[in-house]
Amino acid sequence: MSEQERQEPVVAAQGREPGETGSLGEELTGPTVGERIRRAREASGLSAADLAQPLNLDLKVIEHIERDELDAVPGRPYILAYLRSWAAQLGLDADALVAQYNAQQAPGNEAVQGGIHPTLDVMEPRRGGAARRLFGWLILLLLVALVAVGLSKLDTQQLRTWWAELRGVPVEAEGQPGVESKQGDPAGAERPPIDGALEQPPKPPAEPVVERAEPEQAPAEMTSAGLPEQRLVAIESAPAPEEPEPAPAEAAPAAPVLVLRATEADSWVEVRDGKGERLMYDVLAAGEERSFTDVEGPFSLVLGQPKGLEVEYQGEPVELGEPSEATGVLRTTVGNT
């Protein structure tokens, strides 16, 4: 076997004569699909954003495929389309790359896939789905019947009390008896006449004449306002209420050091601070804004759509350069260098 056949196992498998045979393990002893894409990308000096930008993909899709986590990427037809696009961009054989992917995802190839479960197109269909759905409906109907029976056994007054407790409203007693007279007769009922009763009520007795005594002189002298002098002195000597001290003003929030704003279209953005720590690695949708506070520059930026981005550093707009003609990606540094 030649050096090219050892490095490209799928190409070697396709180049064999009809009489030659080879096991699946022998064809997949070389680098996997993800390793081939990663090595070719690094050899071309491209980043993951350079592969994601032409297809408008999330950067996590590139990372999953380069780590051979193919089940984390939904849709087998989409993966095949990605592989052909990247093969053309990286100078690889698209048919060989697709054939290696099919062999790598073949059933019973757990050793090559690294423990990854088979894709949906090779999984066995579930059985008994209709029976499980019917059983679930029966359980639901049984629960509804139990609730209906329980409610039918409750009294109307109990239901009102329970509902009032849930709402937090005090329960008012309904159907209270009316006010009765002392002997149990209704207040408005007519009483039978009494024998020997007077036809007309007697005249009221004459009021006795009572001589009014003159009021005694008040012992304490009153002021023109009707208050004793001692109370006036106490009121005047009382201390004035202290005015509350004004609350201290809250400190104004710190102004952002770096601001990124997408104005026209979505853009891939990667931001690293002066220490090399990644601050952002995501898609900035059109109309969104991302600000960074309490961070130190200079900041390294990788922008997928620089023409649709606005960058501000310490409140001042930053003029961006021209992106790469091959990939459309712009790499620049913002802040003190």
Image (cartoon, grey):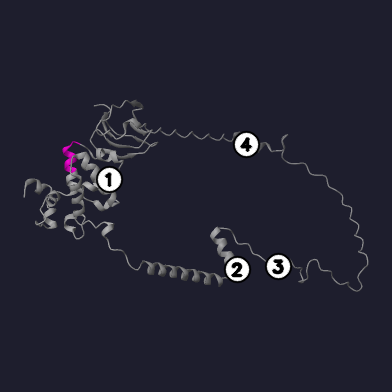
Whichever of callouts 4 and 1 sits on the residue coming sooner in the sequence is 1
Identify residue type, mark 2.
Thr
Numbered tag placed on residue 177 in the rendering: 3
Q: Above or below — where is 123 with respect to 53?
A: below
Whichever of callouts 3 and 4 sits on the residue coming sooner in the sequence is 3
Disc 4: CA contacts within 10 A as few (<14), some (14-19) or many (>=20) = few
Q: Which range is magenta?
A: 38-45
Disc 1: CA contacts within 10 A as few (<14), some (14-19) or many (>=20) = some
Q: Nearer the viewer, residue 46 or 182?
A: 46
User: Where residue 232 appears, x then y in whole percent?
Assistant: 65, 36
Identify residue type, mark 4.
Ile
Q: Main secondary structure of the magenta part?
A: helix
Q: CA distance from mark 4 to mark 1?
A: 78 Å
- Asked which secondary structure carries label 2, the reply is helix
Whichever of callouts 2 and 4 sits on the residue coming sooner in the sequence is 2
Q: CA distance from mark 3 to mark 4?
A: 55 Å
Q: Above or below — where is 105 with respect to 278?
A: below
Q: Which residue is mark 4?
A: 235
Numbered tag placed on residue 156 in the rendering: 2
Whichever of callouts 2 and 1 sits on the residue coming sooner in the sequence is 1
User: Where residue 144 appears, x then y in whole percent?
Assistant: 49, 68
Circles 3 and 2, Cβ within 8 Å, touching? The answer is no
Kindly identify the residue that appears in the image at 20 percent across and 45 percent down.
94
Question: Along the horizontal axis of the image, is 271 left or right of 177?
Answer: left
